[in-house]
Image (cartoon, helix red, strand yellow):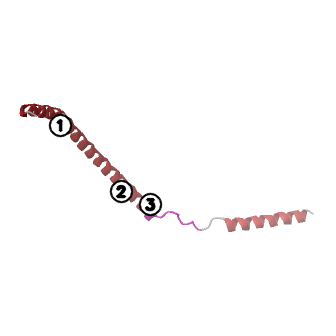
Amino acid sequence: MTKRIGALVALAAVVLATCGALAGCGPKPPCAVSTTQVDASRDACVKSQADLEKARNDRSALETEVSRVRTEIAELEPQPAALADRLETLKKGSGR
């Protein structure tokens, strides 16, 4: 019986060693992401940042333009009232 147990243990050791060797370290698996994909992603990120900076500059320029136009409108708003008063004066003077 001890010979049988010893043989069984030896067989189990051989099977485990064989399985370990078969499932052990093999060649390194290829990397899922290549360097060209990384470079392409980095380039896309740089382009996006440049686009964002351009959009911010454009927005700043538009806000400046809106501010200038609002100032012009504020300067011109009192004129219709003054012109209406002048028109009334001219109408009264012409006999209408």
For the N terminus, which image quadrant?
A: bottom right
Q: Secondary structure beneath disc 2? A: helix
Q: Is residue 18 left or right of residue 39?
A: right
Question: Callout 3, which amino acid?
Answer: Val
**At label 2, which amino acid type do we have?**
Lys
Majority secondary structure of the magenta segment?
Answer: loop
Mark nearest the camera among 3 and 2 is 2
Tag of residue 38: 3
According to the image, label 2 marks what residue? 47
* Foreground pick, 94 / 15: 94
Q: Indicate the position of residue 77 as horizontal and vertical percent values.
A: 20, 35
Which residue is most to the left?
93
- Indicate the quadrant where residue 43 lies: bottom left
Foreground of the two, 5 or 33: 33
CA gap between label 1 and label 3 equals 57 Å
Q: Tell which of 3 and 42 is nearer to you.
A: 42
The CA distance from mark 3 to mark 2 is: 14 Å
Q: CA gap, disc 2 to disc 1?
A: 43 Å
Tell me where the magenta segment starts and ends, as one range.
Answer: 27-39
Q: Residue furthest right?
A: 1
* Mark 1 surroundings: few (<14), some (14-19) or many (≥20) residues within 10 A: few
Q: Position of residue 10 (x, y in %)?
A: 81, 65
Please name the amino acid that badge 1 sits on: Leu
Q: Are marks 2 and 1 in contact (CB under 8 Å)?
A: no
Asked if residue 6 is positioned above or below residue 72 in the image, the reply reads below
Mark 2 crowd level (few <14, some 14–19, many ≥20, 10 Å Cα): few
Picture coordinates of residue 83 (x, y %)? 13, 35
